[in-house]
Image (spheres, rainbow, N blue to C red):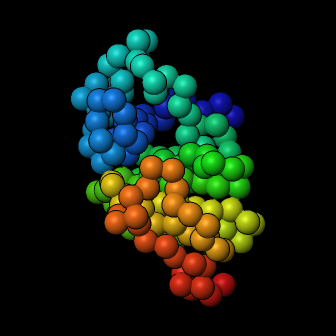
Amino acid sequence: MSRSCLTAGCSLCCKVLTSEFNNAGTWCPNCRPGKGGCMIFATRPKCTGFECGWLQGELGDHWQPNKCHMVVRAGDSSEDLHVNVDPAYPDAWLKEPYHSELRAQVKLGGKVTVHVGNKYVVIADSFDGLPKGADKNKLKIVLPEALGKD
């Protein structure tokens, strides 16, 4: 099944990701959520090639960003994920089934970095360094045992 931001009515990436027009957690001024999305779509700059994990078909339907309040994107390695959470729903990543699926990714050897605005939570089996661009003063490291038992 083909997915589309336009048909899904989704433009959450225009809020939760930093661009040359906005900081993470604030709407891009070129975006009209629920009213057609990007107003400069044909000429938009760097964000032209961005596709979230849901749009790429790598995630289940329940990961549709405007419904789960999160945008999932690939990390530095194929096992790593970045989850950008809408600051209006900062605990969305802790709800099920999302929380269990993120923990399962860590058990497979991946690292999950959860971003809420300008703050980060890294979930990993072991910690081997800050994610790219992370400010250590805004970072919390969570090892799987702190997230509860299976």
Q: Quadrant of the C terminus?
A: bottom right
Q: What is the number of callouts on the image?
A: 0
| Residue 92 in the image: above or below residue 16 | below
Q: Quadrant of residue 49?
A: top right
| Residue 103 in the image: above or below residue 65 | below
Instruction: Decide which of 57, 77 is in the foreground and name it.
Output: 77
Q: Can you name the residue that lies furthest to the top here?
A: 42
**Residue in view at x 73 percent, y 66 percent:** 109
Q: Quadrant of residue 145?
A: bottom right
**Residue in view at x 56 percent, y 69 percent:** 123
Is residue 148 something that shows in the picture?
Answer: yes
In the image: residue 114, left or right of residue 37: right
Q: Quadrant of the N terminus?
A: top right
In the image: residue 109, left or right of residue 13: right
Spot occupied by residue 86 in the image (x, y as percentages of width and height): 36, 53
Spot occupied by residue 9 in the image (x, y as percentages of width and height): 42, 34
**Residue in view at x 28 percent, y 25 percent:** 30
Is residue 93 something that shows in the picture?
Answer: no
| Residue 11 in the image: above or below residue 149 | above
Spot occupied by residue 146 in the image (x, y as percentages of width and height): 53, 84
**Residue in view at x 60 percent, y 54 percent:** 81
In the image: residue 86, left or right of residue 141: left
Spot occupied by residue 7 in the image (x, y as percentages of width and height): 49, 29
Instruction: Decide which of 16, 94 is in the foreground and name it.
Output: 16
